[in-house]
Amino acid sequence: MILPLAKLQPGMHIARDVSNLNGMVLLTAGTALTAHHLRVLNIWGVQGVHVADQGDRPAEPPITPALRQVAENYVNHRLRYATDSPSFAVWKELAVRRTANRWADQPPSVGVPHGSKAPQSGEATPPTWPVAAVPATRHRAASNARDFVRQSAGLPSLPSLYYELVRNIHNGDASVNTVCGIIRKDHGLVARLLRLANSVFYGLPLEVDSPEDAVQIIGFNEVQNLVLATSIIKAFDKMASDQMDAPSFWLHSIACATASSMLAEQWYDPLPERFFVGGLLHDSGRLLMLLNAPEQSREILRRCQAETALAMEIEQQVLGFDHVVLGAELASYWKLPDSLWEMVRCHHNPAAAIGHPKDAFFISYADFIASVLEFGKSGELFPYPLLVQPEHEPFLLDEEQIPLVASELETQCAQLFSIFTS
């Protein structure tokens, strides 16, 4: 059947090739639509697309009643603070199925985030923050979040390559050749650029095999944000593996980054690439806490578990400030744009955003999605409720869209996690 562009949703499969007016194939038959694809089709003025019958999609594997009960007990405990969030029943069902499938596919000692076995029926065991016993040798007294950041031992910095790229792009001096000349200084960055251009994130019908082609396709702003995203992850490479479960932390961060980009593209934001960086940075303050206040971090975790409390409340009591303030101070220290600062600072309370409230809401929504569906862990035992102002209600996903967006997030996140962490 043919659907107009306004009726297309991420996750739908194309039944016939989609071409522009010049006959160039934009998307091939069988492609699963992503939010980025919808934006591209809108740019090219495509009016309608042949899509496959959604009833032909394979059914999900069944879940045994016993496993479902255990998964539901666990999810009910985790989502105790999120029950008033919009479309909660749909998100909860997805979380239950995702948890049950994970436990069915893996031995309980691996699949369950806490302890050596799955909780028994009627029992709900909270997950742990991925932090081990770390010697408390780095913390210095700080009167506020800014002092804490400035006094942090070994505060990570961004590479000069990033600032060089920003200067060229913002001064209007950038060309494909100059941008490629800058990124070629880092061979790993070139490899990531090509992998990203050829990933499901863009879903291009042809293979991109040169940095010049990748830059032309992705655009200067996207390349700038790719460099920033890579630099952020590399900046924290020095963190020892026994201090935290780094893959789990970055899986959550990349899932939030991916989901926020998807939401921005869903609503045709003109610069959706900046949301990826905002999502990647949103919990960076917790990394600083772990690096420079490991003893306090353990105390925060212990109290969150004992009191079944939200982390920000305990952070305020233990340190006098919380991870969102620390993350915003780090963004300021790195001289990142105000929009990114506000995304980080207000990702649990978009109503507090002044200059970029919609941006903060997209990060908040994406963090809610990544947390509820448990893509990795950043230190939150319990997902925060999604706070929606009246002006942001139009940006909520329809309930029939939610499973499709969750499926797309699963696919994109797997590829992007490999690209950014390898």
Image (tube, rainbow, N blue to C red):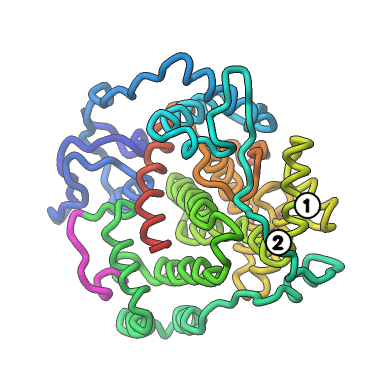
Q: Which mark is residue 382?
A: none
Q: Position of residue 40 (x, y in %)?
A: 32, 52
- Alpha carbon of mark 2 to alpha carbon of mark 1: how far? 10 Å
Crowd tier of the residue under label 1, counting other residues whose Cα lies within 10 Å: few below 14, some 14–19, many 20 or above: many
* Magenta residue span: 205-215
Q: Nearer the viewer, residue 111 or 367?
A: 111
Q: Nearer the viewer, residue 164 or 131?
A: 131
For the point 36% across and 36% down, the residue is 9
| Tag 1 residue | 315
Q: Nearer the viewer, residue 192 or 39?
A: 192
Amino acid marked by disc 1: Glu
Please state if 300 lies on the left or on the right of 285 as rendered. right
Tell which residue pokes out farthest to the left in this image.
23
For the point 46% across and 68% down, the residue is 230
Task: Tell whether position 207 is magenta.
Answer: yes
Task: Tell whether position 196 is magenta.
Answer: no
Residue 208 shows up from this direction: yes
Tell which residue pokes out farthest to the top in this image.
65
For the point 84% across and 69% down, the residue is 141
Q: Earlier in the sequence, mark 2 or mark 1?
A: 2
Q: Position of residue 23 (x, y in %)?
A: 12, 53
The quarter of the image holding the C terminus is: bottom left
* Location of residue 86 by image quarter: top right
Tell which residue pokes out farthest to the front in this image.
116
Pointers 2 and 1 in contact (CB under 8 A)?
yes
Crowd tier of the residue under label 2, counting other residues whose Cα lies within 10 Å: few below 14, some 14–19, many 20 or above: many
Residue 260 shows up from this direction: no
Please state if 309 lies on the left or on the right of 80 as rendered. right
| Tag 2 residue | 289
Q: Position of residue 200 (x, y in %)?
A: 30, 51
Q: Label 1: state its secondary structure.
A: helix
Amino acid marked by disc 2: Met
